[in-house]
Amino acid sequence: MRTGRIVVGTDGTEPSRAAVRWAAREAVDRGARLAIVHAFDWDWESARYDSGSEYLDVARQLADAVTAAAVDQARAAAPAVQVEADAFIGSPVTRLLDSAADAELVVLGSRGRGGVASLLLGSVGQRLATHAPCPVAVVRGGNDVVDGPVVVGVDDSPAIDLVLATAFDMAARRRAALAVIRTYPGTSERDAAERQHLDEQLAPWREKYPDVPVETRLSQKTAAVALTDASPGAQLVIVGSRGHGALAVALLGSTGRHLLQHAACPVLVVRHPVCPEDRPDRPKDLLESVRRHLPPLVPRR
């Protein structure tokens, strides 16, 4: 059951601070609660014989400082936000996936250090974008742009209705224009047919959202290149994941992967929410990582 809750990961770096600010504004905009998650690895193997628990105390103090700062950042960006923060010992991927189980959105920074880190250039971000059971937003580039369009890529995938519903809703709530990009291989002789098809796809959504200005663009570039080219000056780029239900958790297409690496603005990967019982098994290494660490710290409120 989803409960109007947005989860954002932080490790104290500037990219994660940008993610906290973006998530706080998004939470207020949606009327959702914001849950800030900080997960860090404590070297239990080397410190477990320290009778005074000095290492754990230091780690706990640092974690408390990171989460307290993130709460302050969220409230500064969106004073009306309802926010809570939890600090965990353990795998960042595992902890964020657990926190995302009943969330409507997970938000991450573009990269960081340790903890919620290496987000797009390393394994943590890739795994979260691929395996999260809900939409994932990665805050990149011009995350403070407020007057640019929302950009969305449109194709003929079965998920297109969900992608368009999300795109029109995001544009409407931001009072922004919507730039819809459809790419196709071939020559300009196909323009008329492709434009007609795009107009047909958009017709019911234009009717539902008559106040959203819509610009349509056709491109013979790949979707990844066309959407990346459109990202400078945009508030947000929206792209769909591949598959349905549990399958959507296991597949992230090449367009999404490219945008997560190269877009000049925040990227939202849209997927159908997946119930916990429908989720595929997590990679074995994630489960082993959980077993190697202590239970979570006491949540900070």
Image: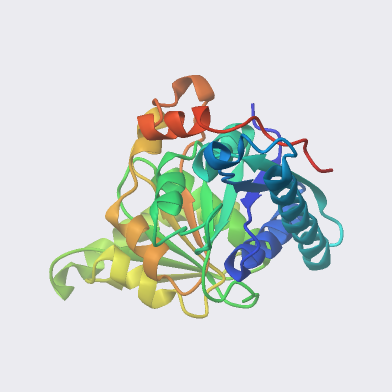
Residue 91 percent coordinates (x, y):
52, 41
Number of disc labels? 0
Residue 175 vertical position relative to residue 135 in the rendered view, above or below: below
Residue 73: image x %, image y %? Answer: 77, 64
**Residue 204 in view in this figure:** no
Q: Is residue 277 left or right of residue 8?
A: left
Query: On the picture, is 301 further left or further right than 52?
Result: right
Given the current orientation, which residue lies at the most extreme top position?
277
Q: Residue at x 32, y 54 (%)?
A: 155
The residue depicted at 56 percent of the width and 76 percent of the height is: 142
- The answer to which image quadrant residue 139 occupies is bottom right
Q: Position of residue 296 (x, y in %)?
A: 67, 34
Nearest to the observer: residue 45 or residue 295:
45
Residue nearest the observer in this picture, 228 or 48: 48
Viewed as shown, does residue 270 lie left or right of 219? right
What colouring style does the render use?
A: rainbow
User: Is residue 196 placed above or below 95 in the rendered structure?
Assistant: below
**The C terminus, quarter of image:** top right
Task: Judge whether residue 175 can be spotted in this image.
Answer: yes
Residue at the image position 50 percent from the left and 64 percent from the top: 110
Report the quarter where the N terminus lies.
Answer: top right
Q: Within the image, what quadrant is residue 56 found in?
A: top right
Residue 86, horizontal then vertical, whole percent? 73, 43
Q: Residue at x 16, y 64 (%)?
A: 185
Q: Nearer the viewer, residue 86 or 6?
A: 86
